[in-house]
Amino acid sequence: MTHTLFSKHEETLQKALAAIETRGYWSPFAEMPSPKVYGETANADGEAAFRAHLNSTFEIDQPTSGNTVGSELSPFGFRLGIRYPSASADMLIDAAAHAQRAWRDAGPTAWIGVSLEILARLNRASFEIAYAVMHTTGQAFMMAFQAGSPHAQDRALEAIAYAWDQLRRIPADAHWEKPQGKNPPLAMKKRFTVVPRGTGLVLGCCTFPTWNSYPGLFADLATGNTVIVKPHPGAILPLAITVRIARDVLREAGFDPNVVTLLATGPNDGELVQDLALRPQIKLIDFTGSTQNGTWLERHAHQAHVFTEKAGVNQIVIDSVDDIKAAARNIAFSLALYSGQMCTAPQNIYVPRTGIETAEGIMPFDAVAQTLAAAVDKMLADPAKAVELLGAVQNEGVVQRIDEARRLGRVLLESRALAHPAFTDARVRTPLILQLDGTADSAQFIKEWFGPISFVIATDSTSQSLELAARTAAEHGALTLSVYSTDDSVIEAAHEASLRGGVALSINLTGGVFVNQSAAFSDFHGTGANPAANATLSDAAFVANRFRIVQSRAHVEPKTLAA
Amino acid sequence: MTHTLFSKHEETLQKALAAIETRGYWSPFAEMPSPKVYGETANADGEAAFRAHLNSTFEIDQPTSGNTVGSELSPFGFRLGIRYPSASADMLIDAAAHAQRAWRDAGPTAWIGVSLEILARLNRASFEIAYAVMHTTGQAFMMAFQAGSPHAQDRALEAIAYAWDQLRRIPADAHWEKPQGKNPPLAMKKRFTVVPRGTGLVLGCCTFPTWNSYPGLFADLATGNTVIVKPHPGAILPLAITVRIARDVLREAGFDPNVVTLLATGPNDGELVQDLALRPQIKLIDFTGSTQNGTWLERHAHQAHVFTEKAGVNQIVIDSVDDIKAAARNIAFSLALYSGQMCTAPQNIYVPRTGIETAEGIMPFDAVAQTLAAAVDKMLADPAKAVELLGAVQNEGVVQRIDEARRLGRVLLESRALAHPAFTDARVRTPLILQLDGTADSAQFIKEWFGPISFVIATDSTSQSLELAARTAAEHGALTLSVYSTDDSVIEAAHEASLRGGVALSINLTGGVFVNQSAAFSDFHGTGANPAANATLSDAAFVANRFRIVQSRAHVEPKTLAA
């Protein structure tokens, strides 16, 4: 009864199950784009595969209206020119319904086995997907490779492991035997069937199309659901490649490939998505994107269980620090990485206006602010190195937001356009840092300013900093909180603030770990406890509502005699 | 760190964990009201305790506006005359917020230990609660005892076990150490804190005030939430006693008793409940009641995770049967028990108009219908015995519904009022059974006719019966489906219908198990896969969203050396 693909990947699955229990370091997918791991020609082959997609129609044998859509632009300055077959909501829903019965009946080990095989194939396509991620999101290559391929695959495997961890606890059958005093016992055989919810809809974003979509996609598949993948119109290719690979595996395993379909759309896709999201067949929605769209789904798609990751305001509280330069370097890296376009990138940096304690005595507020600005400036001094850190800005809206933000306060560090040595028309911007006041400017800094925009905020005290951090997280959402202090009681107060704000806390990061980074199998990404996300990647709650159990029972002979 | 109350009850908890994994028969709370188990004077003491509540003000030391409410009527024909302190939504929300911090910080073993201690005390109050259930719901004593006390306690323990089963998998901390080639590894200590969602609101019903409320109440408590219990205005006493006991245990364990409060209301409580249900502090809602109110909560209380059990249409498909009399006796018991006021009681009985196969050859439709009606009539022939099965009708609405239903079709068995030997003014009605047509009358029978109302429905074939059953369950909701057939292919088709309808299936019940009964630790009550309920009692999905995990991380020394 165990599916062959389950047996094939069982060792990896067992290690993943051990990892989610202990939450130490573990990663099955190599994060370095090393020829030794991925093959000597893997990079060149992946780039060639990416280039072959350009200016042509993406081949995918699924239901289509016969038209094509697609207007992706590389943030590095060229049109991808890829056309994707379009489809109506009805077509994809009907195709999913048709595929559903045999997929449902295949049962848990088939769902898990097929999911793991898809993942193994995605790993082999890591370079092709990395270039697709790079040229849709604007991430520099190294990040596009890591976040777009192995790290996204890690998060997918994590979701599959959580799904199996729940599925494996449900017995397929049970013998129930109730004593009846001097009469023979009542005995029944019970059968428990795991039933998927129906069709899942995965709505991707334009900054992390694979990393943010894989957990929902694979949690759906691993629990027997069919899935319609709707990428952001600006970042279709990485998910189109993903869906095609998934369909290949499904077909080879004897299933209708329409278990997974792609819904490619143009930039004005709002109505189509809203229509689809409210269909009664759509029972699960995984969304990453704006608060406006996410909240709309939460409030209208009542027929579905809706998982959202939305806007948030990530924060750093600086109270005291031994080595301000090490702290500033660490923070600078977090601000610069992918031009602050990570959902985990810090925005608000709270510093008491009376200054902070350091190993060299009190450092005034202005000096702290200047040190932070200088650290960013220094890190980005060489444009050739800077672009490998910054990547490119995903869309013009971010550039406009930088211009708008400039007016909010005193500029500590100006945002500059950089020329990219390899891509003449790349849209590259360095971070803008402003100084704001913790009391007077709160209306501005409690909002998310998505992009390379951050604020050094003068507060009355660390107490006020922590109070602002906890309240902002609780009321407006946050994925990360970071604290710098040499005082244990402040660390403990920061811990309490993180619990109140429902936000993950990083303490005194001065080395090679950055607040933006969250490692699958160890760090929970998001908590579900504040408005930035209503779920975490991943835990039991992320998977347990994606399936149901339907039982049957019938009398059988008792195994024991009457008393 | 393990709470003493956790240790005290750990053996029971371990047995419960084993039971939910194997789902065989297990029950820690004795279901017979036996003096040997509960004590020689337990029944008399319990009845006296119940009587002492009558015509007085219920003592409970919680925030109150100073006014009292209460207008409960025993369906056995007298006013309870109990007044309960009233409170505003603000008062109870503030009290919960005040109690929350210390309760949150106490952690999982305290939440589980305190919950288990409350349950042990509730078991000791089983008779008092049984009489309270009897004289609010109209259940006859034996059922009020079993369903109201030990079986409700079983369901509570089951929810606690599921909660612990999830909580225990979350490590309190982890050592994370990532190799860095020739450099020293990156090492971090991570701390994972389980954080409750906030305040839960439990909305009780008037037919099973404890059985249907305990799972949500205890799932909330076991995961660290505070809880406001809002009973149905017609069945306050059983939950008032429950809340008082919970508060006693909390106080004795050193917690603010306002972790659990009672919101007693009058019959026109709609606005108050709607106001409370939308408060941002209310993060969890457990509701049992009408589809109208349940759907309103699902569509409006966006700030909360809402668990609902609503109306449904339970169905029996009769295809073929060896012993029609045994089947009819079993069905008759299900129709008569508590006057069909169980959410699991059958309503639609589908029989092919061409008749059914029996051991004695084909039995025509009319004969099947008459056999069913006669079995009910015979079972209720002796009024003194009948009232112990029927109990009383909870409210006048049910009586009016019987009158309304009479006009729907040909009456196979008339509903009669019975005189109760012990309670002169008891509202007792025998079941009404009508004949309907599977095609012409579907608009009527796809609705729930709550109460002692059932339909024998003539269909074209068993195929049509199963198609009607699956579609009605999927579209209008159902908690139970029952099939009678001697043909394995029909049983398999019924199994498929149950998966499509997302409804639990009972097969060929002719003995001492009835379709209305679901046994904790073995039978899932509801599936969450059709409109009758969006969750099951109980599984991982019932508990996993009641808490979140908030992590912190800080660098530590690596345990291994650089490569």
Image (cartoon, coloured by chain):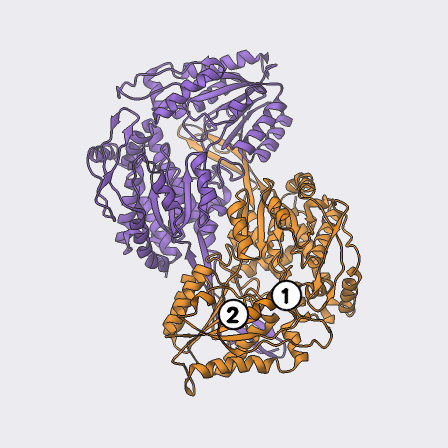
Chain colours: A orange, B purple
Residue A346 marker: 2
Residue B117 is marked as none
Q: Residue at x 55, y 29 (%)?
A: B472
Residue tagged by mark 1?
A: A396
For the N terminus of chain B, the quadrant is bottom left
In depth, the one of B319 and A63 nearer the eye is: A63
- Could you tell whether B521 is left or right of B268 in the image? right
Q: Are marks 1 and 2 on the same chain?
A: yes
Provide the secondary structure element on which disc 1 rests: helix
Toward the bottom, the furthest residue is A360
Toward the viewer: B192 or B282?
Answer: B282
Answer with left or right where residue A480 lies relative to residue A491: right
Provide residue B548's location: percent of width, then percent of height. 46, 56
Q: Residues within 10 Å of mark 1 (few under 14, many from 20)?
A: few
Q: Which quarter of the figure has residue A502?
A: bottom left
Q: Residues within 10 Å of mark 2 (few under 14, many from 20)?
A: many
Mark 1 and mark 2: span between their CA atoms?
21 Å
Image coords of residue B285 (percent x, y): 41, 45
Q: Chain of mark 2?
A: A
* Left or right: A274 as drawn, with respect to A38: left
N-terminal label among 1 and 2? 2
Image: A101 above or below A511: above
Return the x and y of residue A147 as percentages of the image width and height: 63, 65
What residue is rendered at 62% in x and 18% in y?
A: B460
Tell us which disc is closer to us: 1 or 2: 1
Quick check: marks 1 and 2 in contact, CB under 8 Å?
A: no
Q: Quadrant of the C terminus of chain B?
A: bottom right
Query: Can residue B31 be seen in this snapshot?
Result: no
Image: B219 above or below A388: above
Secondary structure of residue under mark 2: loop
Q: Exactly how many numbered labels are in the figure?
A: 2
